[in-house]
Amino acid sequence: MPNHPNLGSPHHPIFQWKLFQSFMRQNRELHCSNALNTPKQTKSSREASSPFAELLTRRRGCTMADRSLTETLSEWNDLQKGNEGLQQVFQKYLDDLQTTSYKQSEISSNIARQHRHLADLAKSLRKCEHTPEAVALRIQIQQRDNELREMEGFLPKPSGKYLSLVLGNLNVTLFSKQAKFSYKVEYENFKLYLTCTCFLLTLALRLWNSYKTIDTLLNFLLVWYYCTLTIRESILVLNGSRIKGWWVTHHYISTFLTGVMLTWPDSIMYQKFRLQYLDFCIYLSLVQFLQYYYQSGSLYRLRALGQRRSLDITVEGFQSWMWRGLTFLLPVLFFGHFWQLYNAITLYEMACECGWQEWQVPVQSFTYLLLFVGNFSTTLRVLLQKLREKRQKIS
Ligand code: COA
């Protein structure tokens, strides 16, 4: 054809159009054969090798990697099968939950009955003579009571008034030893992070700044911190921690104390006490660092004691570690307690000096005195209790 000398060339538009049409025909056939379960690789490999593959996929409005309807359907069927399995497992899980909840209430009422029975037995035993049998029975009753309390640690309990008020009607019982341990570790870490933050802020205030606004920020942080501690400690106590009641009360009182500090206006009296207060806060942060070291060490050692059968940390090993820790910690703690007494005396003198005009001064003086008495006496009590236990173990 003279008008179309290059018609046979692969670059000629008419040649390309014909090639495209033939490709489309092939593709339609391919699609039909795919619907009749033609192997998938054949189609994709043919499409990929085709010169018009890209053009075609663009026309379809999708990418090379997209699946055909058949593929999607077959995957959907697989998913359906998987989902049936999941539904069955989930149903079983719901049934188990119901059974567990039923068992929990059954065991709880059984334990309550046994507690009452043991209390009756202990009461009648008190009226009996102090024979060796009676003493042995009393010890057994005490042991059984302890076992029941341990069981209660793994059952849901009412949260108590304070937690219900703060968190609402929420179950905060932790059911495994691992969960209890993790919560305690997290509590100690939380105290450490906040102690670091407060330490840096207090140091900055002590060295460079005397703005009341920044002081307020520190006191606000402390109020929030102590408040949070009371919540976390109530959860710990509910989950079987042996924290003495005073340490929790001590944090309620500290919340109150820092709250009063927050409301103290920037007066002459405030400025007079400010540096002593900041120094005390810095010292308290250092005490808390040491407490963290002692408490977390004790936590990990006790866990190792409770979990390993071939104990590589012996009870004696733990005891000697504990006494070494206490020998280092106790002087620092007692110094802190006497600093609290010193704060109480300073504030009392200031209250007399200003004619009791600023209510924050006497209130804080009394609160520091309360903290000194509570902290000092409780620490002494803990120390005496530990010494008594040590003597009992030796004899
Ligand atoms: N705050 C929070 N929890 C405390 C605590 C405290 N001050 N003191 C003890 N606990 C916890 C322990 O972690 C342990 O918890 P667990 O049952 O969940 O394992 C439980 O109470 C029993 O501890 P215990 O054996 O009585 O004492 P300990 O050997 O752990 O600690 C002291 C003894 C004296 C070091 C510790 O009570 C302490 O640091 N007290 C001083 C606090 C103080 O005075 N602060 C103000 C400083 S100015």
Image: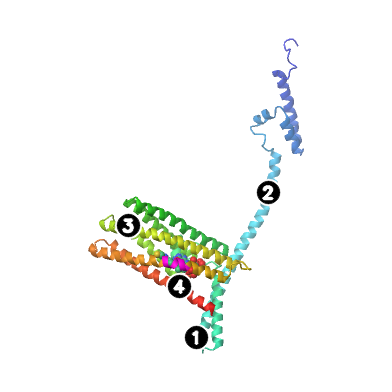
Q: Which residue is mark 1?
A: 126
Inter-mark Cα distance, 4 to 3: 32 Å
Relative to the observer, which residue lies in front, 93 or 255? 255
Badge 1: residue crowd in 10 Å (few <14, some 14–19, many ≥20): few
On screen, residue 195 versus residue 361, left or right, reads right
Range of residues picked out in magenta: 326-332
Label 4 amino acid?
Answer: Leu
Q: Which residue is mark 2?
A: 80
Q: Which circle's residue, 1 or 4, is located before the other in the chain?
A: 1
- Of discs 1 and 2, which sits in the foreground? 1
Inter-mark Cα distance, 1 to 4: 30 Å
Label 2 amino acid?
Answer: Gln
Give x and y (percent) for residue 334.
Answer: 40, 68
- The quarter in which the N terminus is drawn is top right
Q: Which residue is mark 4?
A: 383
Q: Is mark 4 within 8 Å of ligand 1?
A: yes
Relative to the observer, which residue lies in front, 226 or 24? 226
